[in-house]
Image (spheres, rainbow, N blue to C red):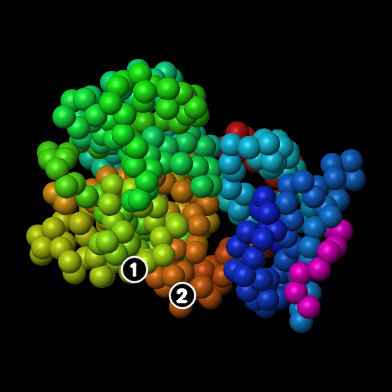
Amino acid sequence: MTATLGIVTLSLQHEEAFTHQLAKAASSFDLEVVRFTPYDLKPASNLIHGQKFKSGQGFEASEFSIPDMIYDRCLYQHDAQSKKAKPIMTWLKKYPKTSFLNTGIQDKMLLFEQLRIQPSLEPYLPVCSLLKEPSDLLNMVKRGGYCKIQPLSHQHTAPTCFISLKDKSTFTVQLSPEQKMTFSRPSEIERWCKKYIGRYFLQCFNTSDQKDFLFNEIRIFLMKVSQKQWKSMGIHTKSSVENSLLSHTQNSVHVLGFDHYLHSLQPHIQELLLDDIASIQSSLSVFIDKTFSPCIEFAVDLLHTSEGKLYISNVRSKPGRSAFLKAYPEKENQMIQIILEHAKSMKSQQKEVSYEEKTLHHRSSSDK
């Protein structure tokens, strides 16, 4: 019997091409694909006014019941639409007749606190603290090195900034490689950061030398190929021209495979980096399985310094795919196969799980 896989996003245009290719391949797995937004759900009837994929015709407007399985690709912003969508998604995750392929990381600050407890990961973690008031930022910047602020929740296109103190008097905020702000007084940067209070947290990256310092961004993309096995789909970075204090990997035009960057390093730095990546990948996969199940994919963002120091700067439970597929376009079909095989496996398991067990599972995991 064909089961329904629903792909939910905040906009039907999000990842449209990838979703179309996934839907085309789904029939080979006895799966029917629908897509919708949280706003398309009509709770009174439990019907969704979304789109259904039809072979040879593509996605067409359709009304259907809540799907058997849902793949959550909602990336929230700090806006009215996201605030409207979140309670609807919370309700869906409690709905006992459907299963989710993945769950999101709700609190990044809590995540980093949990990671610091892991002995194998602690050496790669920056010092973190919640941004409660402007003085928190000032105090961290004055420690030396670089301070990064990032949102507590998983938000798309949310600003991430690096802040540093030069000559004990000038605060520099780098928003992108091309966009930089400077503040000569503490009161000025305090006013600037007020809009982030309560929604962002701080990370401190200590360095021995701030002069002409570079952070080279590296992203590892992992997917779950079986119940207990994670596979690294690939590692990518950017050209050395784009690597700077901050240049967002996901939005980069010049994305490169990892080998290009690796070969630019001295042999002893190469060996150290490869060992560190292997350790992070292994330990983080185990942690994700224990803490954020169900999970089908995640990406870990690393910052590699010119000194050879490696930091974990972010963990994404709903990683974007556009930058990865620029570096590895041949991996798209493999990614689709993994998602559909995972859904097919969940479909067979659903037959063995009672309604009461599913209800209990959703209740116990609804706060994830």
Left or right placement of residue 234 versus residue 158 in this view: left
Which residue is found at the position 60% from the left and 68% from the top? Answer: 18
Task: Classify 122 as above or below 286.
Answer: above
Task: Classify 45 as above or below 226.
Answer: above
- The residue to which callout 1 is attached is 256
Instruction: Give how far across and how far down residue 156 sits, in percent.
Output: 53, 47
Residue 59 located within the stretch drawn in magenta:
yes
The quadrant of the image that shows the N terminus is bottom right
- Spatial CA distance of label 2 from label 1 is 11 Å
Q: Residues within 10 Å of mark 1 (few under 14, many from 20)?
A: many
Left or right placement of residue 61 versus residue 242 in this view: right
SS category of the residue bearing label 2: helix
Which residue is found at the position 32% from the left and 62% from the top? Answer: 238
- The residue to which callout 2 is attached is 329
- Label count reads 2
Q: Which of marks 2 and 1 is nearer the N terminus?
A: 1
Task: Classify 294 as above or below 53.
Answer: above
**Which amino acid, by three-letter code, is at mark 2?**
Pro
Instruction: Give how far across and how far down residue 108 sits, in percent.
Output: 45, 36
**Which residues are the magenta region?**
57-65
* Residue situated furthest right in the rendering: 45
Which residue is found at the position 78% from the left and 78% from the top? Answer: 57
Instruction: Give how far across and how far down residue 257 sits, in percent.
Output: 33, 69
Whether residue 237 is visible to the viewer of this picture, yes or no, is yes
